[in-house]
Amino acid sequence: MQDDLNEALPDEIELALAHTSEVQRAQIWALFALDQRLARIVGKATEPLLAQMRLSWWRDMLKMPADDRPKGDVVLDAIGAEWAGSEDALIGLVDGWEHLLAEPPLTDAAIDAFAMGRATALAAFGEAKTRPDRVTTFNLLGQIWALADLASKVESGEERHSIVQSGMRLCEQDLPRARDFKAIAILAALGARALREGGRPLLEGRSAGLIAARAALLGK
């Protein structure tokens, strides 16, 4: 089972990737490409059971040794090349997206579990694997991005309010810098701005470019 999808990523992620080193880019691209596949599965779901089956396929593939997986899918191949040995974090990403298949309206528990699944995958990226002090930073910043992105896409005003409230509780903390990972610094900075403005799209408005540039320079 495969998803016949365009691999183009959202503009804010393309912007974040543009500030990522060549060494880091392939690994983080694989993560975001998988994230977008999962988003499409959940976002287009009309039958939750069918969507769960498609998510389960990805979970099964990630549990399988890379050499045993089917070849030819650009995202699955990239995961095999860039995430070997760290697939547990990507399984957590799949689990996070599955929480959005719950009966509406989304509960606070489902919202938080979704954000943590996305953030945990980011925290497994790159230097976080060898620098435990970065895990907490990446988890916090990753949740802010995850919640802001979700808030900008839900149709229900009630759900958007709950998501924004969850995100604002995180934004009230003293946000750490992430100079060694500009991609997450940019996404978190854009996310925090979007949440403060009620859940607007991350790149909407004239100040978005300035926010991204500042985060790339200062790490927050």
Image: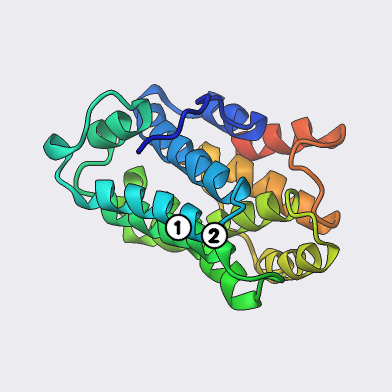
Are the residues flagged by discs 2 and 1 in contact, CB closer than 8 Å? yes
Which quadrant would residue 78 be assigned to in this image? top left
**Which residue position holds label 1?**
52
Q: Quadrant of the N terminus?
A: top left
Q: Secondary structure at mark 1?
A: helix
Q: Residue at x 69, y 35 (%)?
A: 212
Give the quadrant of residue 219. Answer: top right
- The numbered mark at residue 48 is 2
Q: Residue at x 38, y 61 (%)?
A: 133
Q: Is residue 138 visible?
A: no
Q: Amino acid at mark 2?
A: Pro
Residue 169 placement (x, y as % from top left): 70, 72
Q: At label 1, which amino acid type do we have?
A: Gln
Which one is nearer the viewer's eye here, 168 or 95?
A: 95
| Of the pair 110 and 211, the residue shown nearer to us | 110
Above or below, comparing residue 64 to residue 160 in the picture: above
Q: How many marks?
A: 2
